[in-house]
Image (cartoon, rainbow, N blue to C red):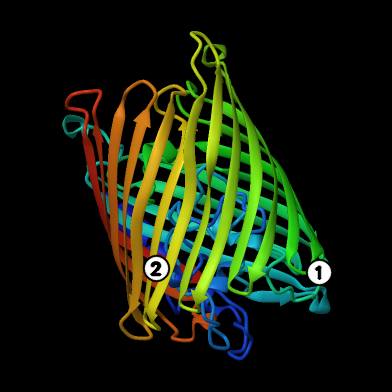
Amino acid sequence: MEIRAAFLFSIALAVLLPGGVAAQLTELPKNTPLPSMLLPKIDNAPVSLLPANPSPPAFSDFLPLPPAGEAVAVTRSSSTRKSANPDADLTVHLRRWQTVASSAGSQPYTWGVLGDAAAHVALGVQSALFFTDNIYFQTPNRAREETMFEISPVIKLDFGDPQAWLNSMPTKQSEYYASLLYVPTFYYHLGEEVDDYAQHFLGEAGRMNEISRVVLRLEYDERLLISSENTSPEENYTLLDASALVERRFATRFTLRGKFGYKQVEVLPATANRSTLTGEIGAVLEISPKTKAGIGAEIGHVMFEQDALGTQDYQQAFFTIDWRPTPKIGLTTRTGLEWRQFNRLPPRPVKTSIVTQTGFFWQPSDKTRFNLSLRVANQPSVLAQGSLFREIRFGPDFTHDFTPHFYSAGEFLMARRRYDTGRLDWEPMGRLALGWREDPDKAHNRLNVEFFFQWHRRERSDLANADVQRSQVGVQVTKFF
């Protein structure tokens, strides 16, 4: 087994590090202003962008303009509260690879093909080697240590000029666009003969001009609990997500928006499989260059695969505010009331509650960035057979550049979940990282190495001796060719 582990790690190093086979591929000239890394730069990552915002802003609205050529640098996994995709909503947790979507505003272009046709290809690999003291997140008497190796080839194709949203600055290279992303992930248990496999697919097509935007999107994603992601078991499921989005600007500062979506969640065992239909309409007014405000409404219908769980219907009325008092401070929020009905026996009263997703960004210096986020939402459980839980998630994260090559990153999150069965869970999570980027010019940095330590604990109120805890330590390497 030690030979097998060493063999796998040597393959990864040969592929990822300079001088390997992939490094012999022809690279673009250094003056080509194309970003080259996979995931959004953590220092500029958005903090819980508004779910289904009626007029979602680009997060660059909250940041000072970067120097010429500045682009993506840090490549670690994106947490659930840092998606660059503003079209997400509260019904499903954000996923690991969503931030590579064309509408995410962070493009890992490495090659341009077909000349003026604006077609781009991105090929890369992200891998992680880490040790975990509780691989399946079980109670102490059932905890199992393991050394894991993950490797994820990345294939991305973009045709046309992907546009994010009406409030962004279109490049006008093309009115129509399409994007395909495929990321398979292979998981190897180095201490036993067990291999796992998961995959992510995202495709979207759209049309955007100065007054309207239309987007069709399809996503399929699998998430495994053994992954190096620092996520809760409530966020581990297979997701199929399809949506259609329409935005239209009727005046210089007034925009209307509509969205329809379908989501399917599957878990093992299949006791809480469900499908959700959602619809939304909203409007936003740009009060000033620094302030945008809006109102909207969302409805949803939740259908469980097991007839005994019945169905749920909910309605939300909300307001949104996007505020940037200075180039280094930003606040965005969607807050409102939710009414939820339960169509099952025995009957239950309508649940009325406040829901919000709020993020605050602060950049005290060019080297330090700080985010703070709050999420309050209701969601059916994948662990407790569809039982509804009310979740409050709160926490900060930061990054700091020591030198152009070395940086540090950290985040802490406290999640509180109260289930309608009376169960109460507390889940504190933390992650610290020290990273190195090969090229100080972030637009041409094709190799990133990050050493990380993360800790996760869950405390349950309904079952004695059921608390669990897990620590992971390892290294993550991302290489684009």
Q: As rendered, which of 292 and 419 lies closer to the eye?
A: 292
Foreground residue among 29 and 351:
351
Q: Amino acid at mark 1?
A: Glu
Where is mark 1, residue-wise?
210
Q: Secondary structure at mark 1?
A: loop
Q: Residue at x 49, y 86 (%)?
A: 441
Residue 172 falls in which quadrant of the image?
A: bottom right
Q: In this orientation, does residue 91 appear? A: no
| Residue at 56%, 67% in the rendered image | 59
Q: Nearer the viewer, mark 1 or mark 2?
A: 1
x and y percentages locating residue 336 in the rendered image: 54, 44
Identity of the residue drawn at 24% across and 28% down: 461
Q: Is residue 149 visible?
A: yes
Q: Nearer the viewer, residue 43 or 271?
A: 43
On residue 341, the disc is none
Q: What percent of the width, then of the height, locates residue 383?
A: 40, 28
What amino acid does circle 2 point to?
Leu
Q: Which residue is mark 2?
A: 13
